[in-house]
């Protein structure tokens, strides 16, 4: 069988788990050991995707998975190219400083392609168009992780906010709430940039409402994140209306649902009413609009009026408006309604809002499976699940790729994938990738950009990583992040200095 | 007996399509130490992950891992070592993405019911993570939270599949 020369678009956890599985499956003892090359491209200069630019700073343990990614990157068959944005058309949200490389320049150098670029755009709410005081949770996550796309944007003016309304009840919404309500003195030891801590120290936020259109059983957050909300040191939760916590007769709760209900019923560790910041978990509420600020107001710190429709659940667990409404005075609205893939990525399906893939393999708009083109992670599944689901998906994708390429070694009796490849349900395969490729060739555009210092490799990242940790140690914290300008200066590019 | 229970639970969880994963394809690292004190049903080597201790003579505890392919791997281990560290030291397919800090569910194991009640109850943190484990069973635990004690001598743990393999119904 011909070798696998794989280009991976994206260098997040899914990419690394696929790469790691491929590398480990073809060890030096394997006849195919040297028949594998993996080139991983990311539009950002730093690798690890959401592990670096998504995981909440107060969850440092989750980032330990990068040890495995570092191990994979120490295999000479894997190379990382940071700051390379593979495009078909110009992206909706380009990253400053990233080199644009047309997909067609890439694929002539590779026999295999994996789309693993995640879900990088926030899903917006039709009634809540973005403005200075109505932002996506992603933009706040980008701010507190210093994502390259927001480096030159001003920080959120938390000093003028008193009440924040977060729309959506998933883990991102709880991450944002926790970042806003946790005392900065507690966050200081984590990977929170000094510039972010400064803004948090000036914050006037006293109240946070987390609003969801459905009930507690439909909420997407996990119990760990909810428990953390209940245990916040300087905050308390306003008890939830018990009618909203009633469990419909005949409902069989999952383990996670019953533990979520227990937590919500028990309430926060700090009892409400004392001098705490407070948290409201608002269930069965849908925003219908945000009235613009009025000029003459009794309380200028709460300029906006958020209108809410009250819902009840249909037997199919859909949110149905009851006709009742209410309003909420607020200073800022944050929408945390999930994420979708960048629509300009190849084989994007607008109805799915991610890549069209069936069982790891990418399918084109006419239903043909693309030969040797795969998708993994959120780019393939949509934005859901925690690290373990990403890992399990990635291992499955790697196994499919191996079984397709080296069936004599990796095909297992009973797997559907082989029979599918043999004809059957996959039908005609469309080919776009190179039939053969020089195992070590790299697109010229990438080499040119690398020569000018605009493309990073994994050794660059290792140096930056160590330096960030070193700078952090001096400040008594996990790490102090660099942005691309700092990193370039540190790496001695552009004539910068420390 | 445990083997049949373990396979039943795995079959039961297969509706989620996680159970029929292909066996682990890990590189075996040769030339590494294989302590003489270890009885092997099937050959394994300690790799660099090892954070485990050598048991004192006469104080060896026994643990048997049942991998997805049905193979049994029995090791003599020291009191105080946890199941995740032991599995990784012997290169079994247990992930431990968070480094054993009870912040993920990738070291999920299924415990022999005979031993399940001998293990101290899971705390909130572990339960929060078990909520997210694939193929959860009545006797599921996180390997990083099970510390070997004399009471657990002879414990048997089954490793659930760590891949989501393609099924025909994925094509429907």
Image: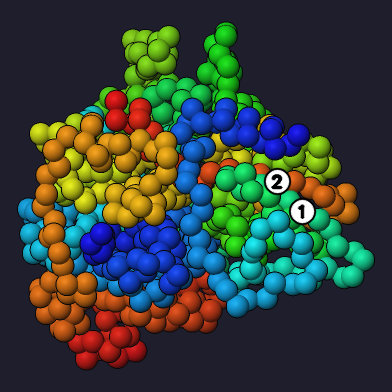
Q: Can residue A297 be seen in this view?
A: no
Residue B157 image label: 2
Mark earlier in primary sequence (2, 1): 1
Residue position marked by numbered label 1 in the rendering: B63
Q: Mark 2 lies on which chain?
A: B
In the displayed structure image, the side of residue A438 where residue A235 appears, left or right = right
Q: Where is residue A251 in the image (x, y as percent from the top left)?
A: 56, 13
Q: Where is residue A39 in the image (x, y as percent from the top left)?
A: 26, 67
In the displayed structure image, the side of residue B53 where residue A458 appears, left or right = left
Residue at image location 7% in from the left, 53% down from the top: A89
Q: Can residue B52 be seen in this view?
A: yes
Q: In which quarter of the image is the C terminus of chain A?
A: bottom left
Q: Is residue A328 above or below residue A370?
A: above
Q: Quadrant of residue A239?
A: top right
Between residue B100 and residue A281, name the one nearer to us: B100
Q: In this view, does A486 lie above or below A260?
A: below
Residue B21 image label: none
Q: Where is residue B157 in the image (x, y as percent from the top left)?
A: 70, 46
Query: Tag 1: Cα neighbours inside 10 Å, few (<14), some, or many (≥20)?
Result: many
Residue at image location 63% in from the left, 34% down from the top: B7
Q: In which quarter of the image is residue A170?
A: top left
Q: Is mark 2 on a helix, strand or loop?
A: strand
Between residue A33 and residue A46, name the one nearer to us: A33
Q: Are marks 2 and 1 in contact (CB under 8 Å)?
A: yes
Q: Quadrant of the N terminus of chain A?
A: bottom left
Between residue A51 and residue B112, name the one nearer to us: B112
Q: Farthest residue to the right: give it.
A: B58
Residue at image location 63% in from the left, 76% down from the top: B32
Q: Position of residue A466 (x, y in %)?
A: 45, 80
């Amino acid at each position: 069988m011909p070798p696998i020369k794989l280009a991976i678009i994206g260098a997040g956890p899914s990419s690394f788990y696929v790469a790691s599985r491929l590398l480990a499956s073809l060890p030096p003892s394997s006849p195919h050991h040297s028949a594998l090359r993996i080139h991983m491209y990311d539009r950002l200069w730093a690798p690890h995707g959401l592990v670096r630019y998504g995981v909440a700073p107060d969850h440092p343990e989750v980032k330990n998975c990068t040890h495995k990614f570092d191990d994979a990157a120490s295999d000479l068959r894997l190379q990382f190219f940071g700051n390379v944005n593979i495009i078909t058309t110009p992206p909706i949200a380009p990253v400053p400083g990233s080199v644009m490389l047309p997909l067609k320049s890439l694929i002539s150098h590779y026999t295999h392609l994996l789309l693993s670029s995640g879900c990088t755009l926030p899903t917006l709410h039709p009634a809540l168009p973005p403005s200075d005081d109505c932002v996506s949770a992603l933009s706040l996550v980008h701010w507190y992780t210093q994502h390259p796309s927001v480096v030159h944007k001003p920080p959120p003016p938390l000093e003028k906010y008193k009440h924040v309304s977060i729309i959506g009840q998933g883990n991102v919404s709880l991450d944002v709430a926790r970042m806003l309500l946790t005392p900065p003195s507690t966050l200081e030891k984590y990977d929170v940039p000094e510039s972010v801590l400064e803004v948090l120290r000036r914050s006037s936020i006293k109240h946070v409402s987390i609003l969801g259109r459905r009930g507690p059983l439909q909420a997407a957050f996990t119990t760990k994140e909810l428990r953390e909300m209940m245990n916040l040191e300087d905050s308390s939760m306003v008890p939830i209306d018990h009618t909203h916590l009633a469990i419909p007769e005949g409902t069989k709760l999952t383990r996670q649902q019953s533990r979520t209900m227990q937590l919500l019923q028990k309430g926060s560790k700090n009892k409400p009413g004392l001098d705490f910041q407070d948290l409201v978990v608002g269930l069965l509420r849908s925003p219908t609009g945000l009235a613009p600020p009025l000029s003459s107001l009794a309380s200028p710190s709460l300029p906006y009026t958020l209108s809410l429709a009250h819902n009840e659940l249909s037997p199919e667990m859909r949110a149905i408006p009851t006709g009742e409404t209410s309003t909420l005075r607020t200073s800022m609205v944050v929408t945390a309604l999930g994420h979708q893939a960048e629509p300009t990525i190849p084989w994007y399906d607008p109805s799915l809002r991610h890549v069209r893939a069936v069982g790891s393999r990418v399918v084109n708009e006419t239903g043909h499976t693309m030969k040797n083109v795969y998708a993994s992670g959120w780019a393939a599944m949509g934005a859901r699940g925690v690290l373990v689901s990403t890992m399990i998906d990635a291992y499955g994708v790697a196994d499919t790729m191996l079984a397709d390429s080296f069936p004599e070694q990796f095909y297992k009796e009973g797997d559907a994938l082989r029979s599918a490849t043999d004809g059957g349900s996959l039908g005609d395969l469309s080919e776009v990738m190179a039939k053969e490729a020089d195992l070590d060739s790299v697109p010229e555009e990438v080499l040119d950009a690398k020569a000018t210092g605009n493309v990073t490799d994994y050794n660059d990242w290792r140096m930056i990583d160590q330096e960030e940790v070193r700078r952090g140690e001096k400040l008594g914290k996990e790490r102090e992040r660099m942005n691309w300008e700092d990193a370039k200066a540190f790496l001695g590019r552009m004539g910068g200095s420390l | 007996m445990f083997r049949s229970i373990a396979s039943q639970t795995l079959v039961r969880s297969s509706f989620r399509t996680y159970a029929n994963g292909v066996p682990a394809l890990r590189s075996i690292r040769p030339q590494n130490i294989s302590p003489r004190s270890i009885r092997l049903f099937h050959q394994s080597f300690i790799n660099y992950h090892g954070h485990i201790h050598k048991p004192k003579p006469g104080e060896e505890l026994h643990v048997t891992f049942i991998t997805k392919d049905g193979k049994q791997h029995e090791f003599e281990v020291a009191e105080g070592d946890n199941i995740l560290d032991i599995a990784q030291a012997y290169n079994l397919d247990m992930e431990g993405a968070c480094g054993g800090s009870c912040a993920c569910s990738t070291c999920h194991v299924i415990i022999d019911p005979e031993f399940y009640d001998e293990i101290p109850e899971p705390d909130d943190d572990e339960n929060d993570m078990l909520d997210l484990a694939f193929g959860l069973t009545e006797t599921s635990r996180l390997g990083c939270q099970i510390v070997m004690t004399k009471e657990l001598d002879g414990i048997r743990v089954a490793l659930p599949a760590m891949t989501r393999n393609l099924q025909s119904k994925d094509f429907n």
